[in-house]
Image (cartoon, rainbow, N blue to C red):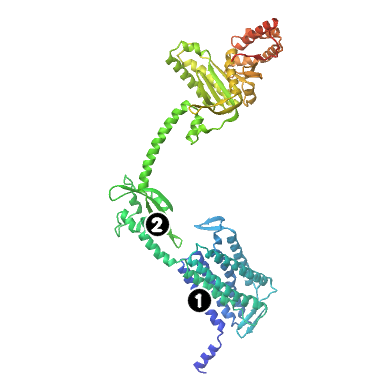
């Protein structure tokens, strides 16, 4: 037999499908690596490479299945084939998810070693499909997916799937599911690529991937799924058309990768022609290259001379900025740099870290000249600072003549003149110096003012310390407001105690200054009172008038602090309090029970007042019933024993005698224990 005869016999024995399969397998792997390198290793190119490798394995194994011996070697190539067709499907779905943009939908972001993964439904779905494919692959390797039979055909060996096998049933279902899912994702990609703002390259990619997918995917479905199910006597060579489709996708990715090569060229031109200074350094901040705009603003770097980018931004003392600022991605605000003409210029520097194959390699700095803005800002800040100082000075002065709350409103941008009237419940305090008029008549004007100023300083500190607000000063009187009754009573005790200290140090008058404090709690109307020429933001109402009347009654009872029953009912803290009287003050139609707060008294007097409390209640009961003789018999011993320290006892002895005289003359009229004051 001649060599020619042997060669002719060998050629005649070649299976055409085997030859085509080997060629497609080699082409698929080659174009996969080409697309991977051409597209600069993007996520899409990595997945395309995976698709090309898996289809290459699938088609390569199919080439030998077509001509294999069913008895002894086809099983080996069948298992090799599974390493291709099983992982190919989830990789294909993953690729479609990426190009359709579904992998970037909102979700929880996980960071791991510089990589981030978004946990959303598409990504989780892809992960589940990878796991299903892996499970099926392992199942097939253990023999679960073995074909029912192998049949020789003129085209080559054909395997008949074992549809009674659960593994084959699941794989068939998943294959149909992957076809349907892929079709949906292709539609989404098509719509995304044909939006008005989509690029031409993306549109071309979608057209190639979608059209070839419809054609070759449909052929594969018929050859590999439908025909074997009906036992058509031809091999399942649909993998060849899947290979052609995947090579078409790789071609589209490589050719229309949004102009990667053109972007590099355009990027270099944009870098050099940009009017903003740009400079690139290595990871140690050594300058590598820069654009023309940089040379106009800075001294040109000499070739071969290492110079760090921080050296261009020396401050007025010749010090470099913190190098750490230049190693972080972001914005470095308002850096100063010396200019060639001796002046200083200011820049905002945008920092961008550049990675090559995930390794930190270069740093790009884009400089924005903000010199004019910086100078204007400095001037504006100076003017604002000066104006702020003047406004604060005026507000400090204003606060001394009005209420601090109004000053805070003005500082926050509000306008107190626009306040609408409002109703609320608060505690109102009136404090007054007793017998101030005859006292001031013995003083000069300067002494009177000095006395009042030192007195108000001491009293006002107590009010502010007690979270109160001074509404106004009326001659020698103080009107103050409190949010609650406890703060008002605490402040009044503090005021009486501070008055004792004040009397110990003041040298303007010889006799001690005494003060009377009246406190009431109730509804008031708060608002601006006055006219457009003069406004007073204050409170008015019956509760305010009553508080003023109660302060006046402190002179009658010779007691420093008198509070109403409304105040006592609102107290939440413990105080030493005793009942004084039931009165009807001028302007009111309802009587009020008055009480004395005596926490400021010394221990002995406090003990005495607590000891006689029940006897006072008994005496006042007789007094209220109109039995003034009995009331006098009860009050008189107490007055003789404690009258010098407790003036209230002498007060009730005297009043009981007066009322008894009126009663005996028949001039008292109806009596219920409430004393009516006709004067203010």
Query: Dot 2: what SS?
Result: strand
Note whether residue 496 is visible: no
x, y percentage for residue 431? Answer: 54, 19
The tag on residue 364 is 2
x%, y% of residue 582? 66, 16
* Image position, residue 499 (x, y; %): 51, 18
Which residue is more in the foreground, 71 or 577? 577
In terms of image quadrants, where is residue 127? bottom right
x, y percent for residue 569: 65, 24
Q: Residue at x 47, y 11 (%)?
A: 441
State how far apart marks 2 and 1 are (Cα): 39 Å
Q: Quadrant of the C terminus?
A: top right
Seen at 56% across and 56% down, the residue is 106
Q: Is residue 511 above or below residue 353?
A: above
Instruction: Give the secondary structure at mark 1.
Output: helix
- Is residue 439 in view from this perspective? yes
> Is residue 510 shown above or below 32?
above
Query: In the picture shown, does residue 446 fall above or below 662?
Result: below
333 relative to 575, above or below: below
**Number of other residues with Cα within 10 Å of mark 2, as a class: few under 14, some 14 to 19, many 20 or more:** many
List the residue tagged with mark 1. Answer: 27
How many numbered badges does the structure rendering display? 2
Earlier-in-chain disc, 2 versus 1? 1
């Amino acid at each position: 037999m001649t060599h020619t005869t042997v060669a002719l016999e060998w050629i005649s024995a070649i299976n055409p499908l085997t030859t085509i399969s080997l060629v497609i397998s080699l082409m698929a792997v080659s174009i996969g690596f080409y697309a991977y390198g051409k597209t600069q290793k993007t996520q899409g190119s990595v997945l395309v490479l995976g698709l090309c490798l898996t289809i290459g394995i699938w088609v390569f194994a199919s080439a030998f299945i077509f001509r294999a011996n069913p008895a002894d070697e086809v099983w080996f190539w069948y298992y090799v084939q599974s390493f291709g067709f099983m992982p190919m499907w989830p990789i294909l779905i993953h690729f479609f998810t990426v190009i359709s943009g579904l992998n970037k939908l909102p979700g929880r972001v996980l960071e791991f070693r510089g990589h981030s993964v978004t946990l959303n439904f598409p990504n989780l779905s892809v992960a589940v499909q990878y796991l299903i494919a892996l499970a099926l692959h392992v199942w097939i390797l253990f023999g679960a997916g073995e074909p029912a039979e192998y049949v020789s055909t003129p085209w080559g060996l054909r395997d008949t799937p074992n549809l009674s096998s659960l593994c084959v049933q699941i794989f068939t279902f998943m294959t149909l599911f992957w076809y349907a899912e892929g079709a949906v994702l292709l539609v989404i990609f098509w719509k995304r690529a044909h939006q008005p703002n989509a690029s031409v390259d993306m549109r071309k990619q979608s057209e190639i991937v979608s059209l070839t997918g419809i054609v070759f995917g449909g052929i594969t479905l018929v050859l590999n799924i439908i025909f074997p199910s009906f036992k058509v006597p031809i091999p399942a060579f649909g993998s060849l058309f899947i290979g052609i489709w995947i090579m078409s996708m790789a071609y589209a990715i490589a050719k229309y990768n949004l102009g990667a090569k053109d972007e590099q060229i355009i990027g270099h031109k944009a870098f050099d022609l940009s009017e903003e200074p740009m400079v690139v350094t290595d990871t140690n901040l050594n300058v590598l290259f820069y654009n023309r705009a940089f040379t106009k603003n800075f001294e040109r770097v000499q070739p071969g001379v290492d110079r760090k980018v921080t050296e261009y931004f020396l401050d007025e003392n010749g010090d470099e900025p913190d190098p750490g600022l230049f190693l972080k991605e972001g914005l470095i605000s308002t850096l100063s740099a010396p200019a060639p003409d001796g002046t200083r210029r200011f820049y905002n520097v945008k920092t961008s870290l550049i990675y090559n194959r995930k390794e930190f390699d270069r740093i790009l700095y884009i400089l924005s000249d903000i010199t004019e803005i910086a100078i204007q800002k400095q001037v504006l800040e100076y003017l604002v600072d000066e104006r702020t100082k003047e406004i604060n000075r005026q507000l400090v002065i204003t606060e001394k003549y009005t209420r601090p709350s109004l000053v805070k409103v003005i500082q926050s941008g509000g306008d107190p003149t626009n306040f609408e009237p409002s109703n609320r419940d608060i505690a109102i305090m009136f404090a007054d110096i007793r017998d101030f008029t005859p006292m001031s008549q013995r003083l000069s004007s300067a002494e009177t003012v000095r006395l009042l100023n030192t007195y108000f300083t001491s009293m006002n500190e107590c009010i502010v310390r007690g979270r109160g607000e001074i509404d106004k000063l009326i001659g020698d009187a103080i009107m103050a407001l409190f949010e609650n009754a406890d703060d008002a009573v605490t402040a009044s005790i503090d005021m009486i105690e501070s008055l004792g200290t004040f009397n110990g140090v003041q040298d303007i008058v010889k006799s001690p200054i005494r003060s009377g404090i009246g406190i009431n709690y109730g509804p008031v109307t708060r608002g601006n009172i006055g006219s457009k020429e003069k406004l007073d933001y204050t409170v008015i109402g019956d509760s305010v008038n009553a508080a003023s009347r109660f302060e006046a009654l402190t002179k009658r009872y010779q007691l420093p602090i008198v509070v109403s029953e409304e105040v006592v009912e609102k107290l939440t803290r413990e105080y030493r309090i005793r009942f004084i009287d039931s009165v009807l003050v001028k302007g009111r139609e309802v009587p009020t029970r008055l009480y004395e707060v005596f926490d400021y008294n010394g221990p002995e007097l406090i003990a005495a007042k607590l000891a006689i409390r029940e006897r006072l209640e008994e005496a006042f009961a007789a007094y209220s019933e109109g039995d003034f003789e009995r009331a006098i018999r009860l009050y008189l011993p107490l007055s003789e024993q404690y009258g010098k320290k407790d003036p209230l006892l002498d007060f009730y002895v005297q009043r009981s005698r007066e009322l008894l005289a009126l009663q005996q003359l028949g001039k008292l009229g109806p009596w219920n224990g409430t004393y009516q004051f006709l004067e203010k």
